[in-house]
Image: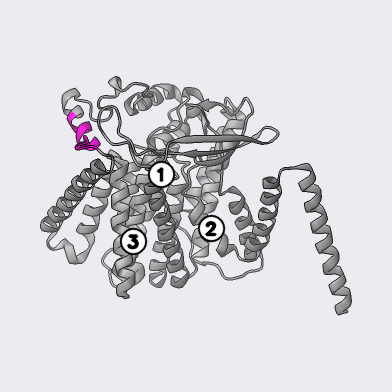
Amino acid sequence: MSTYVAGKNLAVLFFYLFCNAALCALYPFYIVFGVNLLLILSFVFSIKPAWGVYFLIFLVPISRDSIYFAFTGAWNFQINDAYTNLIPVFTPVFIFTCIGFLLHKGASLRMSTARNPANVLFLSMAVYAAFTLFWSDNLPHGLFQYCYLVSNIVLLGIVVSSAANEQTHRKIMWCLLLSCLLQAVLSYVFRFMETSIFEREFIGDVIVGVRNYGGLILSADGSPVQAHGLQEAHETSMLMNIFMGVAAGLFLTEKSRGKRVFLAFCFIAGLSVLIGTESRAGAAAFIAMGLFFLFFYQKTSKALVRSAVIFLAFALVFYVVEQKAFSALAGKEETVMRLLMLGQKAIDTGDVIDPGLSVKEGSGPGRRTIWGTGLSGLSGMWPVGLGIGNYKYHYKIPHAHSVPLSLFFDFGLIGLLLFASILYAIAKYYLNIVKLQHTYLQIMSLCLMSTLVAVVVQGCFDFDYTYPIIWLFGSILFSTLLLTNKPLV
């Protein structure tokens, strides 16, 4: 019997090597390597879908514009020399993790039994988005945008279901922390590299692309170039706010002195990169997050005014010191701080949303133009929206620079109501535990709710509803609230 099994294994190995040899003769080595890597990942994540979740936490924050695949058909139109519909780098891992999750679910293996109160709302959003495809003017584009939405909803469901207990939740949080730390380090590295775009034909009408944002230089107006990572500056600033929220939660619940020092370093690194992005919305989101935390945290709420003044003073001093350091590093005696420069332009022009945009060479349409065009274009469609992805298609805009408005443009009043209902479900669950601040999960809930404030504030001025970072954070938040409320249910 053992001889038969050994012979069978040798036959399988021979067949595998033969197929690889044939592929090497027909295709370049990197394609063969990619195929073998996909086979290994499919096997591993089918057995251990939790490992797939950890991989996704590292891969999802990588922007679709940074590492991607794209179909070059006429339906996939370009905006600013970039394709609108891209296949993100995490897609294969996501698919294999979904398969592993379904296999485990079918085998009734242990997953979280807590029911997400927003499941019906997410399902309703997916169903209604599919319905809007009937009035899509570019059906392939609409289907691609629909895949973005559905994959984000499934991603949220998988992460929530994977966090079956506090132990697993801690692993996920540390994984997210290390993922964000990696992004912060890369942001520093890219400041010393020139911005570049690489695209190569992969197979047929498919291309693979890599985009690097960077450059340790000064703009023509003397302001520092915004820091990026494997995302553009605004995405990086949101990720850093999430990074600091997670680091704060782990810091307040960690007993090891060594780990607390490391977590404090992570918080400082996140704040440094956030300041480097010079994102107004990101900075405002950070301040809102900090003030929310100080107001609800019992140890600071009693001295809220004093705590808030110290917090704001610390943030301002940190900002000035970092900009002085950047000036020295760039070989300049002085640089103009971008946030302060935009503040002065807002005073001079009276335009708070898009200050000085009209004099910026090569600039695209500002937020007020984007929002005004979207609102006027809705016309009689405001109850139901233009249809999923149709706003981008009609006006050739990468995104609506607002999560709630992007939902309104594509899904009308129905989309806004669903968005408000999801926020209401989150708030309702948190109000059950708002006064409980003793355990790991209770304190982590406070820190992540503070981070939600940052995400909502920045989301009103950047992004749209298809950004995976937002959904990844949402999955972490929901899993935390569900586990915290579980003993109370």
* Amino acid of disc 2: Phe
Looking at the picture, how far across and down is residue 336, in whole percent?
21, 34
Classify residue 486 by image quadrant. bottom left
Q: Mark 3 or 2 closer to N-term? A: 2
Q: Which residue in the protein does label 2 denote?
A: 55
Number of the label disc, if any, that sits on residue 247: 3
Q: Are marks 3 and 2 in contact (CB under 8 Å)?
A: no
Q: Mark 2, residues whose alpha carbon is within 10 Å: few (<14), some, or many (≥20)?
A: some
Q: Secondary structure at mark 2?
A: helix
* Amino acid of disc 1: Phe
Give the magenta part as a residue range: 332-344
For this rendering, which residue is in front, 88 or 341? 341
- Distance from disc 1 to disc 2, alpha carbons, whole Å, reads 23 Å
Classify residue 105 by image quadrant. bottom right
* Amino acid of disc 3: Ala
Identify the residue at image location x=49%, y=56%. Answer: 57
Q: Eyeballing the image, is 12 above or below 351?
A: below
Q: Mark 1, residues whose alpha carbon is within 10 Å: few (<14), some, or many (≥20)?
A: some
Q: Which residue in the protein does label 1 denote?
A: 190
